[in-house]
Amino acid sequence: MAESQSDNSAEPLLEVIDGLVPETLHSAACTVCMGNTWYFGNRSTDAHSVPFWKMDLDGVPAYDAVWDAVRLRCEALVGGPLRVVRQYANGHTYGQGGSPHRDDNRPDSFTLLYYPMTEWQDHWEGETVFHDARGEVMQAVRPRPNRGVLFDSRIPHAGRAPSRSCPALRVTVAFKLERIPAVAERIAQIEATPTATEQSLHYTETNRQGALREYSVRFDAALVDARVSEVLESIGKSVRLPGFRAGKIPASVLQQRYGSRARAAAVRSLMEEIIQSVAPDGALISSVVVTKGAESGDVEGEITVTFVRDLPDIDFSAMKLERLVLDAPDDEAAVEAKLHLCEQVLDRLATAWDFVVPPSLVEREFVALRKAADQQLDPGEDLAELTAQLREVAERRIRTGIVVAETARRQNIRIASDTPPESRGRVLEEKVVNWIVSKARVSERRVSVQELRSSMA
């Protein structure tokens, strides 16, 4: 649940968000930070501040998934599309508190702090403190597992060290964010420069079939190079390299060390700008493919989008369902009978519309399913068959979830605003299923408890 920090829009954004991501994703993120890629010597300000631990997380799948899961919520809070400039973890032990600092001095720059711990007790301390313009502490945020803090990067803040009694590493993950200019705004900026003919981006709709759209995309090399320079400049402000002062690393050194990563980030951010234009709310990005220029030169690509809102209405009144009526039911059997009806509805929804499910969403769901299955594997079990089955389940879950969400939107089915984040998906699904049952053609059949359990075995 998000806790608003202020109703005064003139004040800089500072929002605490509990239950930031689903628990399975939080668990995966915690596991990453238990790895062995930490290095020591990072500092929050100058060379006189206390050094602490750091872990680079750019390109780490679990943290890319974290951002995917929270992006829309963050964009709603800042009022526009965002891109990740950098993502990394800081680690503090007793005596390693950070110094007050600003993450960025530019407008439209934001930071999302995330606490990827499985446990944190209050007496371990380690709060993140935020300062006002006078240097006074205006808010202290306790570390809480799966808590996030989204704030204007210009707000001075510091991570306090954990207490002497704390047996764990105080970990915070920072997503350094900046607003993405709208495509029209970006083009206007480009056309206002002397090299407008060289710096341009283009997208063309190449195919339209029902709700499906396909686009070809091209960015001129000069535009990509300019964005690479922006990414490298941002990296140069935060990395530490032996022999160079902070913020004084030559561009050639940054290019040699981080050039490939910066170009990938630049291409990704430009693709995201185009996506903001071709895929408004209610659209699914089925695929984004770079076909040319991943390493150098002009960039060409293809984007496939499904406009979910353009899919035809489902005639729920024609849906045939069967409700099992039990002879002498017990509580457990009553739940199983209700589940039997629910599964019929979800089976119908999984095949109601033909559209491409975004592979990234399927992969994320598959990883969570596989992790749970690995803990229950029997010796000699066919892993290839299990993997295929789990991928089918993952795609069905994502597909059904999309149909449930769109049905809820079309029928104005809502859930209470204070519903815990981890329960929102389940509660919405239950409400949609109940609404569909109320509209469908439902027949009843009397069965014994034994017949019910045999049919569900």
Image: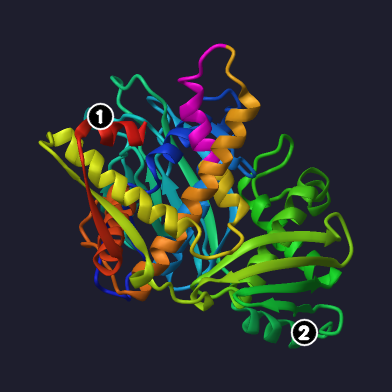
Mark 1, residue position: 121
Q: Quadrant of residue 303?
A: bottom right
Asked if marks 2 and 1 touch (Cβ < 8 Å), the reply is no
Q: Position of residue 124 (x, y in %)?
A: 27, 28
Mark 2, residue position: 193
Q: Quadrant of the N terminus?
A: bottom left
Span of residues in magenta: 366-379
Image color mode: rainbow
| Left or right side of 226 for 343 | left
| Left or right side of 142 for 99 | right
Q: Name above or below for residue 234 compared with residue 272.
A: above
Q: Position of residue 274 (x, y in %)?
A: 66, 73
- Element under label 2? loop
Looking at this rendering, what residue extends furthest in the left direction?
328
Residue 378 belongs to the span the image colors magenta:
yes
Q: Position of residue 305 (x, y in %)?
A: 63, 69
Q: Name above or below for residue 263 compared with residue 222.
A: above
Looking at this rendering, what residue extends furthest in the top direction?
379
